[in-house]
Image (cartoon, helix red, strand yellow):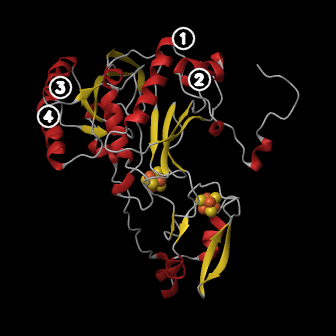
């Protein structure tokens, strides 16, 4: 083999910086039966029992957290896991912490200890699951609200619905702290809503922004390059602008967040497809809600109204989208007592494709 061939065969090993292999952290019963589960049961709220084909069983206790966890609380949760569970925990995408135990007799004492320390067990089956949310002001550069704070304030108010099985079916809620990025589909979604076009700081644009990228970001072609005070900058056609905020991430001088005009909105009925139905888009049901920290009482009151109406009127196993589909949107607004306003009408000029433009009446 020539020297050149030998050199070709020696590659630099890849530098892995991703997540570590999760198997090493799994409970041994889970490791042993990976991919071999036969069925699961719900023995009580907040507890799942999974049974493997081998006959092994494992119990999972799900605990809600306040999402932004300090080190002292994390240590406490881990100490409880060491003492009352088998020393294994995992976090779910909804910021719950889950303990796994291999004997049913360990479940009761674990729950007693968790509740004694102020933690809440629940979030399974037909409950209101913990609200899924984005990183918010802790990590991101564009939030218009503190999504983690919204979640904490709202979950405090629906704690009984988290702990119990008193909903017709599972309720998944989501939040987002800007209008365009993470967050997303939920039975109920609480999202930031911008209500005015961005305000441009022309002195900074040429130093901070790549103007072609910013122009390209706008979904309605409302941004144009412009010279302002002798400096290259941008201008926004405010008649076209739909106040989406997409120009703000690549160009922070296009400030769109502010205390007065960044509002919250509530959307309902988003769902992924499942065995019974195709995916459904969520629809706006409340707009212009004050973004009012630290408890967001106006948004929370609306979410509670929707949950109450759904709980009282939906049939067993109907998700919120199934319920609204059956009763219709006019009845939804009647039952929830939410006003139907001009903001619910899609009046964007590109909406002609999605509007009912035929003479057929739809039921
Ligand atoms: S929703 Fe928007 S502001 Fe919040 S973390 Fe995601 S990208 Fe950032
Ligand atoms: S807010 Fe959205 S629509 Fe308005 S200028 Fe920026 S990207 Fe375009």
Eye-nearest disc, 4 or 3: 3
The residue under label 3 is 115
Q: Position of residue 129 (x, y in %)?
A: 39, 29
The residue under label 4 is 80
> Which numbered disc flags the more N-terminal residue, 4 or 3?
4
- Crowd rating for badge 4 (residues with CA inside 10 Å; few <14, some 14–19, many 20+): some
Q: Taking the image as drawn, is residue 46 in sight?
A: no
Badge 1 element: loop
**Separation of residues labelled 4 and 3 (CA atoms):** 11 Å
Q: Residue at x 59, y 54 (%)?
A: 244
Callout 2: CB less than 8 Å from ligand 1: no
Establish if 139 lies above or below 64. below
- Crowd rating for badge 1 (residues with CA inside 10 Å; few <14, some 14–19, many 20+): some
Residue situated in front as seen by the camera: 262 or 40: 262
Where on the picture, by quarter, is residue 117?
A: top left
Q: How many numbered circles are shown?
A: 4
The residue under label 2 is 333
Q: Position of residue 177 (x, y in %)?
A: 44, 49
**Separation of residues labelled 3 and 1 (CA atoms):** 32 Å
Quadrant position of ligand 2: bottom right
Q: Residue at x 23, y 25 (%)?
A: 102
Residue situated in front as seen by the camera: 131 or 256: 256
Q: Residue at x 18, y 36 (%)?
A: 87
């Amino acid at each position: 083999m020539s020297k050149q061939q030998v050199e070709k065969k020696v590659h630099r090993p890849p530098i892995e910086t991703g997540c570590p292999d999760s198997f090493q952290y799994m409970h041994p019963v889970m490791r042993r039966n990976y991919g071999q589960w036969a069925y699961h049961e719900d023995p009580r709220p907040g507890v799942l029992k999974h049974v493997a084909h081998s006959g092994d069983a494992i119990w999972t206790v799900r605990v809600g957290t306040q999402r932004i966890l300090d080190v002292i609380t994390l240590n406490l949760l881990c100490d409880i896991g060491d003492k009352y569970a088998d020393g294994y925990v995992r976090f779910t995408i909804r910021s719950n912490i889950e303990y796994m135990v291999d004997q049913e007799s360990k479940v009761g004492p674990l729950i007693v200890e968790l509740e004694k320390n102020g933690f809440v067990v629940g979030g399974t089956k037909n409950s209101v699951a913990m609200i899924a949310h984005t990183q918010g002001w802790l990590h991101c550069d564009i939030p218009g609200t503190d999504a983690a704070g919204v979640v904490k304030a709202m979950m405090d108010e629906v704690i009984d619905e988290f702990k119990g099985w008193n909903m017709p079916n599972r309720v998944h809620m989501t939040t987002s702290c800007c209008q365009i990025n993470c967050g997303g589909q939920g039975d109920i979604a609480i999202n930031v809503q911008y209500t005015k076009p961005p305000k441009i700081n022309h002195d900074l644009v040429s130093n901070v922004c790549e103007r072609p990228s910013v122009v390209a970001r706008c979904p309605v072609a409302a941004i144009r390059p412009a010279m302002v005070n002798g400096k290259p900058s941008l201008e926004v056609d405010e008649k076209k602008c739909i106040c989406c905020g997409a120009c703000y991430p690549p160009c922070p001088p296009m400030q769109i967040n502010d205390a007065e005009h960044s509002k919250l909105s509530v959307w309902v009925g988003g769902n992924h497809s499942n065995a019974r139905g195709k995916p459904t888009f969520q629809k706006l049901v409340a707009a212009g809600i004050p973004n009012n920290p630290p408890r967001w009482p106006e948004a929370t009151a609306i979410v509670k109204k929707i949950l109450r109406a759904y709980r009282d009127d939906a049939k067993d196993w109907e998700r919120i989208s199934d319920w609204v589909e059956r009763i219709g949107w006019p009845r939804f607004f009647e039952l929830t007592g939410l006003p139907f306003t001009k903001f619910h009408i899609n009046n964007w000029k590109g909406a002609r494709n999605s509007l009912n433009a035929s003479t057929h009446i739809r039921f």
